Image (tube, rainbow, N blue to C red):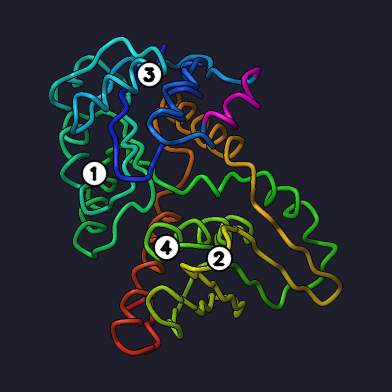
Amino acid sequence: MIRTGIIGMSPGNAHPYSWSAIINGCFNAEEINRVGYPAVSDYLKANEDTLGINGAKVTCVWTQDKEISESIAKTTQIETIVNNMEEMIGLVDAVILARDDPKNHVAMAKPFIDAGIPVFIDKPLAVTKEDLHYFSEQVAKGRFIMSCSSMRYANEGRIVKQELASLGKLELATAVGKKDWIKYGVHLLEALFSLLDDPKPVSVKHVGESGKDIVYVEFENGFRATLHLFMEISPTFQLSLFGQKGWRLIDVKNSYSMFRDNIIEFIRSVEEGEPRLSFEKTRAIINTLMGAMESLKKGGETIHLAE
């Protein structure tokens, strides 16, 4: 049994609740609704028969607020609430850092990285070159660090991926989503890169504005994609692929399925002793994410990622 610790939470991110429920196989819908996440209890109810991950259990929880920790523990039957996250060391075999505020990721992951405990870090891993360099150095030293958006494992994308050959030579991809570039642009990048078998990005250019992000990405193989993140549109995550013989629209809606597959991949990775997802793939996505931010600051200048 892989004893897993969960660390949360950041505003608006219900992963400490939902991911603990998916692993432990139980949840308190009333409590989840009380704290403001009815959509989470809805998809947990709809998939109740598949809850629970064999070989793993969330046994420890820590958040910055004891009441939140108690709520998560109550909701998903977590045995131990620690007063300081470092207290998990020695009590767990793996840690899920379920906060999506990247400015805190280095400080919160470091104690576990130093202790040699496998860590999964919620997206985006980093938004500064300094933080990405730190994680890259730790991986080079053999530390176990895994990070991605769960959209890498979206079933809607996998269904289309098996049909790619029928589209002929791909000429263009577009992606559209709601909310901000940092926390949600990474979703679209992850889904796109995974769909295309993680081609190497060579340049990125931001041609929109903050809150109306329009990002152009060019890959080493010459393929091009545009990504659109708008704060004021109706909620959506969708990608379109256009080939010389056909096209497909991918409308990502099944959050539960991709969360569960992501968790399974992390648990399998811990069992095997190393991440099943190459850190190079994560680094390419984060570099693209940061490159777009830099381009926006520089008035739409093309950022060459190799530099």
Is residue 34 located in the magenta-colored stretch of the structure?
no
In front: label 3 or label 2? 3
Q: Regarding mark 1 in the picture, which secondary structure is present there? A: loop
- The residue lying at 37 percent from left, 76 percent from top is 210
Q: Which residue is mark 3?
A: 58
Amino acid type of disc 3? Answer: Val
Residue behind mark 1: 141
Answer with mark 3 or mark 2, whichever residue precedes in sequence.
3
* First in sequence: mark 3 vs mark 1: 3
Residue 121 occupies quadrant: top left
Q: CA distance from mark 4 to mark 3?
A: 30 Å
| SS for dot 3 | strand
Q: Mark 1 and mark 2: span between their CA atoms?
A: 25 Å
Name which residue type carries label 1. Answer: Lys
Mark 4 vs mark 1, CA separation in Å: 19 Å
Q: Are marks 4 and 3 in contact (CB under 8 Å)?
A: no
Q: On the image, numbered disc 4 is attached to which residue?
A: 284
Q: Which residue is mark 2?
A: 199
Q: Nearer the viewer, mark 1 or mark 2?
A: 2
Q: CA distance from mark 4 to mark 2?
A: 9 Å
Spot occupied by residue 156 in the image (x, y as percentages of width and height): 70, 48
Stretch in magenta:
41-49
Give the distance between the C-alpha atoms of the residues marked 3 and 2, in whole angstroms. 35 Å
Residue at x 37%, y 45% (from the top left corner):
12
Q: Nearer the viewer, residue 208 or 262?
A: 208
